Image (cartoon, rainbow, N blue to C red):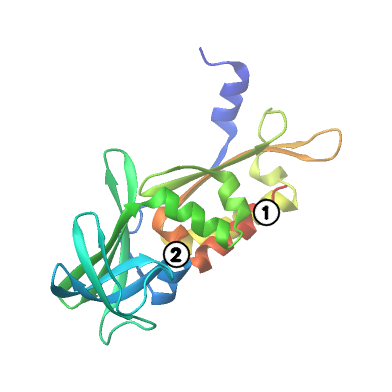
Amino acid sequence: MLTELREKMLLNTLVFETLGAPEKEREFKIKSLKKWGFDLLFGKKNGQDSYFVAAEDKHKSGDTYESEGSSYEVTEVLKELPKNKKIYAHIEMIEGRAYLCADLREGDENIEILRLPAGEILLAYLKKHKFIKVIEALHNLGSAASLVKHHGEEGKPLPFEELPPIPRRFLRDAKKIEKEMGFGRIALAYFGENKEGKARYWMGWMVPTIALFDEHIAQKIDKTLAEFK
């Protein structure tokens, strides 16, 4: 049964959307791999020349090791991308779980270098760079990530025209980020302030998961979330 309060929330929550599907993939630099906690290596995989990744600083030139049924011989720990090759990463859903997949690409040649659960990598990356507000708001991950933040007792949401400067600034900045990402959905129910003068609100924000692996975007989202205490 829909309560009176839930009906007020339903009818008065502000929603701003940048429609479309979350971006299919995003290009990254080799330094992004390092920030995610990986080195790009060149050597032999099962006896064949190949590129692959390993945990940062775990292996050096000349190392041999085995992992998940494959044998590896490290020739070089790369500091720069090989000429004409680029890194593209995307999110792939497998049985309800998001995986971060990265490919080293040159023309039609595509070498998969990474396929691991996205959540563990993302949390470690966000903690490393102290994007605490994103961590606190992160609710679940798919091809899009759900960010949720709330404070105080719920009530009837204020219309846009009555919003004070802080929620207005939040919406303005969030919409700019959405435009840059090409996808997003912001839902804001702002209820005013409590007796102590603190904001009461509920906010839900959907963003492309792969965009959170971009330090530039993650930093902007973290800063925008910080506008709400």
For this rendering, which residue is in front, 173 or 102?
102
Q: Residues within 10 Å of mark 1 (few under 14, many from 20)?
A: few
> Residue 55 is drawn in which quadrant?
bottom left
Q: Nearer the viewer, mark 1 or mark 2?
A: 2
> Residue 169 is drawn in which quadrant?
bottom right
Report the residue marked by disc 2: 37
On screen, residue 212 above or below 159: below
- x and y, in percent, of residue 35 in the image: 47, 68
Q: Residue furthest right?
A: 196
Check residue 226 in the rendering and tell me which mark sits there, or answer none: 1
Q: Residue furthest bottom?
A: 83
On screen, residue 93 above or below 5: below
Judging from the image, what secondary structure is the residue with disc 1 in?
loop
Q: Residue furthest top?
A: 1
- x and y, in percent, of residue 225 in the image: 63, 52
Q: Is residue 68 left or right of residue 165?
A: left
For this rendering, which residue is in front, 143 or 195?
143
Q: Is residue 34 left or right of residue 11?
A: left
How far apart are labels 1 and 2 at the CA level? 26 Å
Q: Amino acid at mark 2?
A: Gly
On screen, residue 58 above or below 210: below
